[in-house]
Amino acid sequence: MTTLLQSFRKNRALWVTLLVLCITFLMAVRGLVDPIAEGGERYKNVVITILRGLSTGSIIFLVASGFSIIFGLMNVLNMAHGALFMIGAYVGWTMAVRPDTVVDAFTPLVLLSAGFTLLPFLDWSLQKLNLPKVAGGLLPWVGLILAIVVLGFAFPKYPITSWDVGSYEISPTNYAFAASQGQLVAPEPEGFAGISPLVGLGSIILGGILAAISMAGFAANRRRSGAGTGSTKESLPWKSFLIFIGLVFLGWIVYFFNTPISTFLLNIDTTWLFILAVLVAVATGVLLGALIEATLVRPLYETHLYVLMLTLGVSSIIIEVVRAIWGAPEFTMPRPSIFDGTGEGCPAESLGALIEHKCSTIQVLGGRVRTYNEIFIPILGIVVLITVWILLQRTRLGMIVRAGVQDSDMVKALGINVQRIFTIVFALGVGLATLGGVIGAPSTGLTTTLGDSLLINLLVALAIGGLTSYPGAAAGALIVGLLQQFIIKYGQIGIHIPFMDEPFKPTPPLVPAMTVLLMVVILLVMPNGLFGRKE
Amino acid sequence: MDNKALLHVNNIHTFIGQFHILEGVSIHVPKGKIVAILGRNGAGKTTTLKSILGLTPPSQGSILFDGQELQGQRSFEIAALGIGYVPEHRAIFRDLNVSENLKIAERKKGDLARKEAFIFDLFPDLKRLIQLQGDHLSGGQQQMLAIARALVPDNKLLLIDEPTEGLAPVLIEQMMAAIRQLSAETTILLVEQNFIVASQLAEDYVIIEEGQSVKAGKMADLVKDPATIRRYLEAA
């Protein structure tokens, strides 16, 4: 009791704010109770709205948690996080709807990245060679130009059977629709356009190596100018060769067995495809995150404003690329089959029936709850919440991250390679964002503005919860999710205000406005957010 | 330079932003001894320690540690060569408990298990507090933890910055006893504002004034030289 009182005295603002939030929440809940209905059905709207709030909050949380850990540890506000969330949705969609396209694209991407696995070797050789100044200065540019030429020659001729944004019959919208009906017919695979496959695949490997040479050259020049330093490793890094050969081999294997793999994937159950889609989306996020960190963010660490501008730029590039590949029109992603049953026994009356018939909806207190959106997503959100929490609290990586958030110089001084931790954390953070994207896609659909609205929500959630606090990210996301869904619900039934004849109905544009308003109020009372630490 | 030197800092210059903080600092730390860096506030004592560790890399000069050049190496590589750092203001990790604060300093698995007995013998209090969060510790306990953390891996050199700052007299005594006990095992480069403490602990001294090392020698000689003490160390 005394400790509770002490805690109250120390954090008066927090307790009062939480109390006010709770009272507001209870009042909002009370307003949704249906006075006419009988028994449990009176709470139908309350339960459904809260579940929807949890769902929205879960998606925001998935993205916000990564964003917040990255900012806490590296002081980088990754404005591309929303766009990367969107990438997760689009890549996941492609795997779920057109796995043959992913198989086609796999080979060139693996062959391209194979070149980059030679980086440790190239770094080593450049240090050994110690090129004269002019040659060293020219090398990265020559490498870059040659890489662009070679890849520009090979990539357009590479056969990737995909879709055409311009023609409805073979547009993503139409494929999405066909997939949701279970009637997808993938187009016939094509061959190389006018060059032999050997030349095509070889050029892509060469292009990757040239790009890697260019990167190693730039890094060497940075080292020379004293901006970054590194130690000379004496032994030849053999391991990078083995990885290179392994990746090239993998790329060729997939190229060789392209058609059987595609056919297999096109015919498996949508639940399996969905699981694969999640894996592919997360892997894409992790790789993209590592790539962005290593190539773009790392050279600019010391200048936070530039990193902010840079990630904003990356964000708009990603959006344009998505628009170019998948087109601007909105389309849907099919739900996995275990959450999509509509036949006999559906909507499910009980949890047992839900699992037995794989229903897309379940009957709760007289209302229908969507299994995927309102049950699966919140559960997944909680699973990720706990997993990341355990990762932070129980592993050495988590310990280093928690320590680094406070004082990364001291972590370095303990002999820990913080640079590597930065890359890992950035990659995992982006992986969480793409996970959020692919998980959210079947419920929200895919548009090129997906990332922008999410970025706003996550910034608001983090401002409310406290920018670098993990519990704060969870609380903020939950508050934003609930608030939005309650306002949407009140938009349908209206709020009775005394002395007004008509109930007041908040319009949809009020939804973002209200979350921002809440943020402003909370920040006025608690400038560091609910759980942020005073610096 | 004699061969027994563990650390030899030779005329380093360090910039922080555009500020020329160190304008030529040289320090000689013989193996097994305690060397105190003395000087007024803002003279560059802390920056000297950070420059050795590469946290504020020097732009000129050389730093030889155990026969290796540290200039150009990254902080974590320097630390891994066997340098422990106890920063000023007891910068322990507030969000980690005592046990984690020690565990994070492991460079090899089992470092902590090996050193535990030694550490808890030196600071018995820490054993009792092992599960307590860093920010619930008192100032003295935090200082003990900060030193203990530097003892977890096998370090050949400890850089200790203001270990007695803001501590009660009883704790200062305790801290001095601990540092003395440590110097039997390892070499220590100490920054200490409190001259009485420094003169009782250190065998050698270096005085830094406005970013330059201006005087060095045996502590025993300095104690007998009130003119030098007044000139460089007393409040201006």
Image: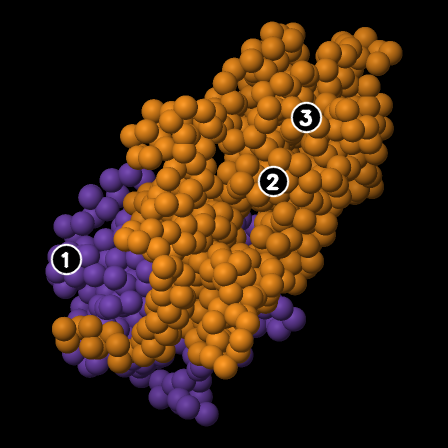
Chain colours: A orange, B purple
Task: Pick the residue in front: A126 or A132.
Answer: A126
In which quarter of the view is residue A198 placed? Answer: top right
Residue B184: x and y, percent?
22, 57
Q: Which mark is residue B14?
A: none
Q: Residue at x 82, y 31 (%)?
A: A166
Q: Amino acid at mark 1?
A: Lys
In this rendering, the answer to whether A284 lies above or below A409 is above
Circle 2 SS class: loop
Residue A422: x and y, percent?
51, 47
Sequence-wise first label, 2 or 3: 3
Q: Residues within 10 Å of mark 3 (few under 14, many from 20)?
A: many
Instruction: Answer yes or no: are tags 2 and 3 on the same subunit.
Output: yes
Residue A261: x and y, percent?
59, 11
Q: Which mark is residue A175?
A: 3
Query: What is the distance, in whole Å, between disc 3 and disc 1 at their CAs?
Result: 64 Å
Circle 1 SS class: helix
Q: Residue at x 77, y 19 (%)?
A: A158
- Asked whether residue B165 is in view, the answer is no
Read off the chain for label 2: A
In this rendering, the answer to whether A100 lies above or below A283 is above
In which quarter of the view is residue A475 placed? Answer: bottom left
> Can you name the residue that lies furthest to the bottom here?
B236
Residue B115: x and y, percent?
20, 48
Q: Amino acid at mark 3?
A: Tyr
Q: Is residue A161 left or right of residue A533?
A: right
Residue on which disc 2 sits: A445
In this rendering, the answer to whether B23 lies above or below B53 is below
Q: Which mark is residue B127?
A: 1
- Asked whether residue B90 is in view, the answer is yes
Query: What is the distance, in whole Å, between disc 1 and disc 2 at their CAs?
Result: 56 Å
Read off the chain for label 1: B
